[in-house]
Image: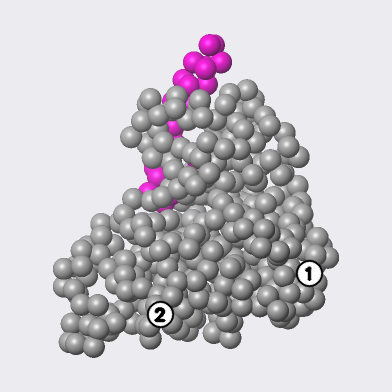
């Protein structure tokens, strides 16, 4: 098997799984309970929270644990929209966002909010001048992802933050960092709100983080809050939080070398693909972990299943939008269906080997020739 769909989800690291299992077995108490078992669980909860906060250089109270990035995104966007609706109902986002953000924006549009989409330049980055022009006195939120999940387009978060605060100091800046974690460096202090997901960095599915700067207020979406979870009701998912903390710590170990390894793999892959009459959509401004290309003459779903016969696993768009047209590429290609409906995403990891890339290219060639001869 050659697994090249790491941006959809990652295998759980055995060391992370050990932490999950140990916590599940040895910390059975509810962290909200006042008895000894509960206190023991709360202490571990605080320890894991402090560990994450130390790595990110933030206050532990700025971390909200959720069920995943989709919940974090919805909580950030709807939480701000409802909290500050008396200040304004104007929101800015981009066509590069994850489905969980785009659909939340659609919901708010039906609720009377005005949503504007910032223009993109030909490299796939936010047009900063377009963003500056869009920001108004009634703009309550700007939500721009750090890394597009289909192509790997990377955004200049620090510059975006400066523009947002310069134009309107009261406008809140949120970024979906789900595809950035482990793929690039960032500073959470550049943002007011940020979203993460555990299963993108070799931890179990079902846990996310919403970073909320301490001076930002949001409306609660899930009621039943406690002292441990003041912005999101529910029993603390202690095994998931502990394993997420472990995964973040492991991810940051030797991160530069991990990224360099993936960059070498990307270079090898792109060089191997350049001999075919396809369009490579991921450029030098993208994180190296994703290589998106459009086959132009072959439907992406057809090619995906051809690769699957050889136990090679890739994606078309994103896992949450599978089977549909690429929103990002549709926008950048000005509606060219040949580009947006024939795209394949190969996503790499520090676990990926050169031999796997070599084998993928051989199988790609087989599938390419088989399908073109039909």
Closest to the observer: 152 or 199? 199
Question: Is 262 situated above or below 232?
Answer: above
Residue at point 52%, 17% (across, down): 371
Q: Where is residue 271 shown, x and y percent of the image?
A: 57, 35
Color theme of the render: one colour
Q: Secondary structure at mark 2?
A: loop
Q: Secondary structure at mark 1?
A: loop
Relative side of 124 to 286, left or right: right
* Residue 358 among those drawn in magenta: yes
Residue at point 31%, 78% (across, down): 45
Quadrant in the rendering for residue 200: bottom left
Q: Work out which residue is located at the far front of the displayed protein and give it.
A: 111
Relative side of 188 to 244, left or right: right
Q: Which residue is mark 1?
A: 135
Q: Where is residue 177 shown, x and y percent of the image?
A: 54, 63
Q: Where is residue 294 shown, x and y percent of the image?
A: 61, 33
Residue at point 78%, 69% (across, down): 135
Q: Is residue 49 visible?
A: yes
Residue at point 72%, 61% (across, down): 115
Question: Is 139 situated above or below 358?
Answer: below
* Residue 141 among those drawn in magenta: no
Q: Which residue is mark 2?
A: 225
Relative side of 120 to 340, left or right: right
Q: Work out which residue is located at the far top of the displayed protein and give it.
A: 374
- Which segment did they paint magenta? 346-374
Q: Are marks 2 and 1 in contact (CB under 8 Å)?
A: no
Closest to the observer: 165 or 103? 103
Quadrant in the rendering for residue 214: bottom right
Which badge, 2 or 1, is on the more N-terminal residue?
A: 1
Question: Is 99 situated above or below 195?
Answer: above
Which quadrant is home to the N terminus? top left
3D distance between C-alphas at marks 2 and 1: 34 Å
């Amino acid at each position: 098997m050659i697994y090249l769909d790491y941006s959809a989800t990652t295998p759980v690291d055995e060391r992370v799984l050990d932490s999950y299992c140990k916590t599940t077995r040895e910390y059975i108490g509810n962290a909200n309970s006042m008895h000894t078992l509960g206190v023991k669980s709360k202490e571990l909860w605080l320890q894991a929270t402090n560990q994450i906060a130390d790595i990110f250089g933030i206050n532990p109270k700025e971390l909200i644990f959720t069920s995943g990035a989709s919940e974090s995104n919805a909580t950030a966007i709807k939480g701000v929209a409802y909290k500050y609706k008396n200040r304004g109902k104007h929101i800015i986002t981009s066509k590069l966002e994850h489905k969980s953000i785009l659909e939340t924006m659609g919901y708010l549009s039906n609720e009377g909010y005005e949503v504007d989409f910032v223009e993109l330049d030909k490299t796939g980055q936010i047009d900063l001048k377009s963003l500056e022009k869009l920001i108004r006195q009634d703009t309550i939120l700007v939500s721009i992802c750090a890394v597009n999940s289909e192509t790997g387009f990377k955004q200049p978060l620090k510059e975006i933050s400066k523009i947002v605060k310069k134009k309107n100091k009261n406008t809140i800046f949120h970024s979906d960092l789900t595809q950035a974690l482990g793929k690039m460096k960032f500073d959470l202090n550049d943002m007011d709100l940020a979203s993460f997901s555990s299963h993108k960095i070799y931890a179990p599915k079902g846990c996310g983080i919403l970073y909320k700067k301490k001076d930002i207020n949001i409306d609660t979406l899930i009621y039943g809050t406690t002292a441990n979870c003041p912005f999101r009701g529910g029993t603390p998912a202690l095994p998931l939080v502990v394993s997420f903390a472990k995964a973040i710590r492991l991810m940051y170990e030797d991160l530069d070398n991990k990224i360099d390894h993936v960059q070498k793999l990307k270079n090898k892959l792109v060089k191997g693909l350049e001999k075919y009459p396809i369009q490579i959509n991921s450029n030098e401004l993208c994180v190296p972990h994703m290589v998106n290309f459009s086959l132009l003459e072959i439907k992406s779903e057809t090619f995906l299943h051809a690769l699957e016969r050889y136990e090679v696993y890739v994606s078309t768009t994103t896992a949450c939008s599978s089977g549909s047209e690429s929103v990002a590429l549709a926008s950048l290609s000005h509606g060219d269906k040949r580009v947006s409906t024939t795209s394949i995403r190969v996503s790499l990891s520090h676990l990926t080997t050169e031999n796997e890339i070599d084998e993928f290219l051989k199988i790609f060639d087989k599938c390419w020739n088989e399908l073109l001869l039909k």
